[in-house]
Image (spheres, grey):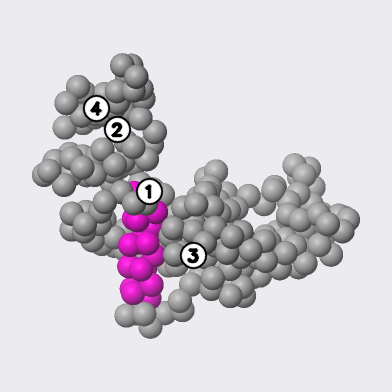
Amino acid sequence: MDLSLNTYLDLPENGIKKQQSGKLVTMTEREKDHSLVQRVQRGDKVAFEMLFTKYQRRVSRLVSRFVRSDAEVEDIVQESFIKAYRALGSFRGDSAFYTWLYRIAVNTAKNYLVAASKRPISLTQFEKNDDDDFEEDHFMSDAATPESELITKQIAETVNKTMNELPADLREAIMLREIEGMSYEDIADSMGCPIGTVRSRIFRAREAISQKIKPMLDVGEGKRW
């Protein structure tokens, strides 16, 4: 059955819209996911295929922060979705589906690294082929001179090195915010801590990175990347 997510949910029996004050209102992405989850829980395998299609690429990007091999990434992604499928019966929608899936993928990646006796986390490179990734031009102007390109490369390397050296809780918080683009609420849910703690961790991570790259940029005090 070859359907896009919205086309599938647009079918009357799948309910992309909900009743509100007598009118049909389009669901939010979280509500769409929850609707699909409920259908999976009732045995609809097509609904799970839709969730897989929607989040496969995003989970792949996440897992690639831990391992470099494309084959390993693919294996971990597949295992993560298998675990998610088997555990969906216990999903109650207290958190966003991706937040729940994120925890499964991270734990699967970490377990893989432990089993393979590899380094816990590798964040040595950020690719520029996706809007969710760290963008080097976030720090530099678009002027493509040899000097600017060299500085840009040095800044990117410094950011990556600094993130690797951050305490695990700060590193995870800044990854979720800047790389995964998650909201503070979802980060708090994912990390199991108050939103205030999340904000503090992200602030401290940004300050640590800022202190490292400030000498490389002509910025004044009080400015951060």
Relative to 114, is 21 above or below? above
Callout 2 environment at 10 Å: few (<14), some (14 to 19), or many (20+)? some
**In magenta segment, residue 110:** yes
Nearer-N-terminus badge (2/1): 2
Circle 3 is placed at which residue position? 193
Circle 1 is placed at which residue position? 96
Q: Which residues are magenta?
A: 96-113
- The quarter of the rendered structure image containing the N terminus is top left
Kindly identify which numbered label has been placed on residue 188.
Answer: none
Type of amino acid under label 4: Gly
Nearer-N-terminus badge (4/2): 2
Residue pushed farthest front?
21
Name the front one of labels 3 and 2: 3
Element type where label 1 sits in the image: loop
Name the front one of labels 3 and 4: 3
Circle 2 is placed at which residue position? 5
Residue at 16% x, 26% y is 13
Type of amino acid under label 1: Ala
Nearer-N-terminus badge (1/3): 1
Residue 161, percent from left and from top? 64, 70
Spatial separation of the CA atoms under disc 3 and disc 2: 32 Å
Residue at 81% x, 62% y is 214
Spatial separation of the CA atoms under disc 2 and disc 1: 17 Å
Nearer-N-terminus badge (3/2): 2
Nearer-N-terminus badge (3/4): 4
Label 2 with label 1: CB-CB less than 8 Å: no
Circle 4 is placed at which residue position? 15
- Foreground pick, 16 / 46: 16
Type of amino acid under label 3: Cys
**In magenta segment, residue 102:** yes
